Image (tube, helix red, strand yellow):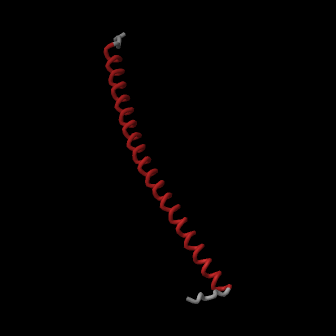
């Protein structure tokens, strides 16, 4: 079988195509890793928002209970003088 000799231009186009396809493969892997990381961060942010919302509710409930207790103490310890 006779092997075809490549010209310099043909060789450069072939090698450029090989380098470009390997570069695209590396970039695709990087993009996939970035997308996975972004999705993981979205889940974490969602979880943190839920925790903060629970914390806000707990604080407001404690303030409500504290103000009620303070009102009761003030009412019963009020001297009519």
Asked if 68 appears above or below 78 in the picture, the reply is below
Residue 50: quarter of image: top left
Residue visible at 44% across and 54% down?
39
Residue visible at 63% across and 88% down?
5
Asked if 30 appears above or below 46 in the picture, the reply is below
Which x, y percent locates residue 33?
49, 58
Return the residue nearer the eye: 9 or 6. 6
Which x, y percent locates residue 24?
54, 70
Name the outermost residue toward the right.
Answer: 8
Q: Quadrant of the C terminus?
A: top left
Left or right for 37, reference 4: left
Return the residue nearer the eye: 51 or 25. 25
Residue 58: quarter of image: top left
Return the residue nearer the eye: 27 or 43. 27
Residue visible at 35% across and 11% down?
79
Residue 26: quarter of image: bottom right
Q: Quadrant of the N terminus?
A: bottom right
Asked if 74 appears above or below 20 in the picture, the reply is above
Which x, y percent locates residue 72?
31, 19
């Amino acid at each position: 079988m006779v092997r075809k000799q490549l010209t310099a231009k043909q060789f450069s186009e072939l090698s450029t195509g090989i380098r470009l396809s390997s570069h695209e493969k590396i970039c695709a892997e990087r993009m996939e890793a970035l997308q996975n990381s972004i999705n993981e961060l979205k889940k974490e942010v969602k979880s943190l928002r839920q925790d903060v919302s629970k914390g806000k509710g707990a604080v407001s409930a404690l303030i409500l209970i504290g103000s009620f207790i303070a009102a009761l103490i003030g009412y019963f310890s009020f001297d009519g003088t």
